[in-house]
Image (tube, rainbow, N blue to C red):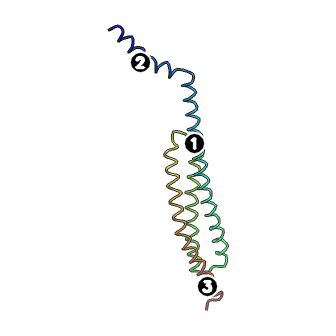
Amino acid sequence: MKKLIIVICMVISVPVVINCSPSGDNKAELAQEEIERDIKNQKQEIAKDLRMLRDDINVKLDKISKELEGAKDKSKEELESLKKELIQHRQKVETTLDNIDRSSESTWDDIQQGAKNTWSEIKVECERLNEKLDMALQNTHKQPNNEN
């Protein structure tokens, strides 16, 4: 019976001694550094996608602003409406980029999912708005300069 107790104590103490060893601490530190590196890379990748989307929105806004200068009533209303939507989308992207910058390791999972959702949503909306923008620009170019 004493031998059995001694064997049980030895079996129980071996993992404790192994986990307390410096190599166990190093493994934990390495794992933590790897997690931090992965999070940093994920943040950079998602932020890059969002910045590209924001840049695309800015290009569209510039195009609309130039067209608004010579646009007539109906076309002007369409372009103003599109501009307003794009500005709202750009603000949503900017807010998401700010959230990414301020996120911590503990909040990253939620921020990451929100950022991915925002990117997907705004990307789809921008594609939808592309069609409207093309139509509005065509209408602007079709209007005669002098209305009688």
Q: Earlier in the sequence, mark 2 or mark 3?
A: 2
Circle 1: element type: helix
Few, some or many C-alpha atoms within 10 Å of disc 1 (few <14, some 14-19, many ≥20)? Answer: few
At label 3, which amino acid type do we have?
A: Lys
Few, some or many C-alpha atoms within 10 Å of disc 2 (few <14, some 14-19, many ≥20)? Answer: few
The residue furthest left is 1
Q: CA distance from mark 2 to mark 1?
A: 35 Å
Check residue 38 in the rendering and tell me which mark sits there, or answer none: 1
Q: Is residue 47 above or below residue 84?
A: above
**Residue where numbered disc 2 is placed:** 12
Q: CA distance from mark 2 to mark 3?
A: 84 Å
Q: Position of residue 16 (x, y in %)?
A: 47, 19
At label 1, which amino acid type do we have?
A: Asp
Q: Earlier in the sequence, mark 2 or mark 1?
A: 2
Circle 3: element type: helix
Mark 2, mark 3: which one is toward the viewer?
2
Q: Position of residue 148 (x, y in %)?
A: 61, 92
Instruction: Report the residue at 52% width, 56% height from top.
Output: 118
**Of residues 147 and 33, which is closer to you in this image?**
33
Q: Does residue 35 appear to the left or right of 4 in the view shown?
A: right
Q: Are marks 2 and 3 in contact (CB under 8 Å)?
A: no
The residue furthest front is 3
Q: Is residue 57 above or below residue 23?
A: below
**Residue where numbered disc 3 is placed:** 142
Instruction: Report the residue at 51% width, 59% height from top.
Output: 120
Q: Position of residue 136 (x, y in %)?
A: 57, 77
Mark 2, mark 1: which one is toward the viewer?
2
